[in-house]
Image (cartoon, rainbow, N blue to C red):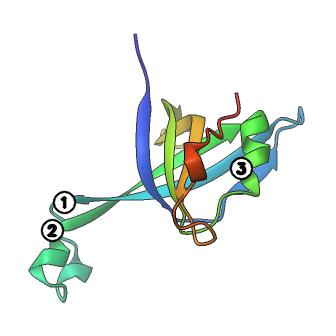
Amino acid sequence: MFNQICVVGELTNKPELRYTKEGIAALNFSLSVGRKGQNETARDVNKSDSQKNYVCDVFHFTAWSNLAEIYSSKLELGAILLVVGRLNIRRSITNNKVQPEIIVSDIRIIASKTNPKGNPDNVKETVR
């Protein structure tokens, strides 16, 4: 079996670094990914036809341990990231809600406000 997902998108919220009871770092963040598609909600009434055919998907990520600690200070709101990880489905026991998340194994900063051209010389910033 093989479970791997690769997402390129814009960082949509400030990454949240927290620690488990055992002291393990966890970094939560979300990426917004635009795609062509049908988005017919009530608030789309005043949008042009080209805007109505553009949909944003939001993916939720969790990075653990060293990767979480290092990238908690490197990630800027609005940065374009390439994130590789595995898909994990969390199920809430209390309300039986399903929440997909991606457990991060690699992060690359493609572009950010302070570095619009991304990582110079394509230096690998992976922490394992």
Using the image, determine if residue 80 lies above or below residue 63. Answer: below
In the rendered image, residue 44, in percent from the top left (x then y), is placed at: 21, 80
**Amino acid on which the number 1 mark rests in the picture:** Lys
**In contact (CB < 8 Å): disc 2 and disc 1:** yes
Splitting the image into 4 quarters, where does residue 68 fall? top right
Residue density around tag 1, few if under 14, some if 14–19, many if 20 or more, within 10 Å:
few
**Amino acid on which the number 2 mark rests in the picture:** Asn
Splitting the image into 4 quarters, where does residue 79 fall? bottom right
Q: Secondary structure at mark 2?
A: loop
**Amino acid on which the number 3 mark rests in the picture:** Tyr
Q: Which mark is residue 68?
A: none
Q: CA distance from mark 3 to mark 2?
A: 34 Å
Q: Secondary structure at mark 3?
A: helix
Q: CA distance from mark 1 to mark 3?
A: 30 Å
Q: Is residue 93 visible?
A: no
**In contact (CB < 8 Å): disc 3 and disc 2:** no
Q: CA distance from mark 2 to mark 1?
A: 6 Å
Q: Which mark is residue 71?
A: 3
Residue 69 versus residue 25: which sits nearer the camera? 69
- Residue at 89%, 36% in the rendered image: 23
**Label whose residue precedes the other's in the sequence (1 or 3):** 1
Using the image, determine if residue 115 lies above or below residue 126. Answer: below
Residue density around tag 3, few if under 14, some if 14–19, many if 20 or more, within 10 Å:
some
Q: Residue furthest front?
A: 121
Left or right: where does residue 42 sit relative to residue 34?
A: left
Left or right: where does residue 60 sit relative to residue 18?
A: left
Q: Which mark is residue 36?
A: 1
Q: Which mark is residue 53?
A: 2
In the rendered image, residue 74, in percent from the top left (x then y), is placed at: 71, 57
In the rendered image, residue 21, in percent from the top left (x then y), is placed at: 88, 36
Q: Is residue 37 visible?
A: yes
**Label whose residue precedes the other's in the sequence (3 or 2):** 2
